[in-house]
Amino acid sequence: MSACVVRFSRLFWSTPPEELHQRRIEQVLGQETGEPPLTVWFLNAQLHVSVPRLHFHNAFSDPLGWTDHPAFTVHQFNLEELTHLVKQTSHPKAATTLVIDSLSWILRHVSPSAVCKTLQQLKKGGAVRATIGLLHADMHQRGTVGSICHLATSVITVAPGAKGDEAVAKITKRSKSGKVIQEEEIFNIKEDLTVMVQSKASHTGPKQPGPEEQETDPTANLTFNLRLSDTEREAKEKLALPFVFSKAK
């Protein structure tokens, strides 16, 4: 793997704190690190608030619940437990954005169907207005990755670029109307984790038809030909029928 490709969670935490706050990213469930990034402390100090705006939940220290009082275990990854966790540290009437870092750790201990069910329930709204899930696609089967991506309205895939210091981010956005927008950005990351975009291209694809909208040819797989040649059509027209319709009817 190219040295320029860092963990996407590190790329996420390189986002300026004011932008994280503007996007109402207030809850982070961390399975791959036990300590909140410096961004959390910097954001809370920058906003000069007594109640922290960005909460980091430690799901790394005891993910399987081996101690008496685990903070959060993988088996608590369900709608009820996540809603309770978010409401404990959020404004009662405010819907927040939940970041899950990462879904790969959860999928090691929870079935893909159960994870997809929880994500679908979170998608319907409630205490969580939006969910950002980080996933290491190379750790899972293609079907599992496809199921997770199918639930998302936006999918960002990060891969090595052509040059050693570049990476490529492929972004797919799906609107409610079915329109698909695809973007591709080539970027590199400086030593201070600043992201520099080198080039950007976008493409708007056609509306993806549903199963009921797809047009099929009913004659595609027939073993005989339904179309008549000119000779066959002429012979058909000259054929005398054994009955004649009455004009009175």
Image (cartoon, grey):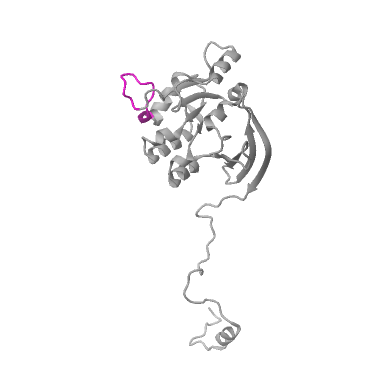
Is 187 in front, or is 129? 187
Q: Position of residue 104 (x, y in %)?
A: 44, 35
Q: Is residue 163 above or below residue 213?
A: above
Residue numbers of the magenta segment? 64-76
Residue 147 lies in what quarter of the image? Answer: top left
Number of marks present in the image shown: 0
Magenta span contains residue 69:
yes
Query: In which image quadrant can residue 163 be found?
Result: top right
**Is residue 53 at all visible to an observer of this figure?**
no
Residue drawn at x 62%, y 50% as measured from the top left: 206
Q: Is residue 192 visible?
A: yes
Q: Is residue 194 above or below residue 161?
A: above
Task: Name the spot of residue 130 as percent of width and height, x first.
Answer: 52, 31
Main structural element of the magenta stretch: helix, strand or loop? loop
Q: Residue at x 50, y 55 (%)?
A: 212
For this view, does 190 lie left or right of residue 246? right
Residue 93, magenta (yes or no): no
Quarter assignment of residue 49 = top right
Measured as percent of width and height from the top left, residue 186 is found at 64, 39
**Above or below 80: residue 116:** below
